[in-house]
Amino acid sequence: MPGSRPVLPDATNGDFLLQALREANARRAEHRVPPLAMDPLLVDYAKARAAALSQHEGLPAGHDGLRAGTGENLFWSEGEKMSDAADAVASWTADDTGRLIRQATTAMGAARVAGQGAKRYETYIVFIFEPT
């Protein structure tokens, strides 16, 4: 689904990926579920998903276009600064832990794009999980 604006810049770095893995595994440990491993191919896929999502304000497309057998958690924020992985995980676990604690899941990827949106600074965070 083509977007209505250019993609936001990639803001994924080593610190973000470490925090993403640490936060996901902390939630999994609370439920006595084995830890995940960060998969570089899933990171690349998460980057592509985050970039595509950022072509629209918010998350109107949701999980449209997600490949079969893959789980995904999405986060979008608008504010004064860039959000981090802890913000995303906190928002997901406030309601439902979803794929973060699914026992069959063994690998994850994560990505973040961020930049000036139409009104304020926007951050999109995507966590990808396989197998689901």
Image (cartoon, rainbow, N blue to C red):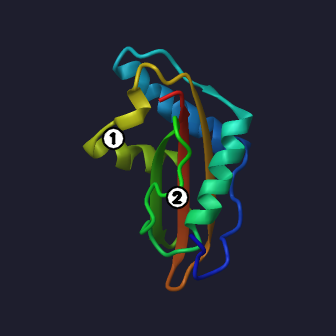
Identity of the residue drawn at 54% across and 50% down: 126
SS at badge 1: helix
**Residue 120 or residue 49, whichever sits in front:** 49
Q: Quadrant of the N terminus?
A: bottom right
Foreground: disc 1 or disc 2: 1
Against 3, is 40 above or below? above
Mark 1 closeness class: few <14, some 14–19, many ≥20 residues within 10 Å: few
Residue sitting at the far front: 68
Mark 2 closeness class: few <14, some 14–19, many ≥20 residues within 10 Å: many
Identity of the residue drawn at 53% across and 27% down: 131
- Horizontal side of 69 relative to 6 (left or right) equals left
Could you tell me if the residues under marks 1 and 2 are in contact, i.e. CB atoms within 8 Å?
A: no
- Horizontal side of 11 relative to 27 (left or right) equals right
- Horizontal side of 59 relative to 39 (left or right) equals left
Identity of the residue drawn at 59% across and 73% down: 55
Residue 83 image position (x, y, % from top left): 52, 58
Against 123, is 66 above or below? above
Against 1, is 127 above or below? above
Question: Identity of the amino acid at label 2?
Answer: Ser
Question: Identity of the amino acid at label 1?
Answer: Thr
| Residue underneath mark 1 | 93
SS at badge 2: loop
Residue 91 image position (x, y, % from top left): 36, 50
**Residue 78 or residue 109, whichever sits in front:** 109
* Distance Cα–Cα, label 1 vs label 2: 16 Å
Q: Is residue 84 visible?
A: no
| Residue underneath mark 2 | 83
Give the label on residue 118, or none. Answer: none
Mark 1 or mark 2, which has the lower sequence index?
2
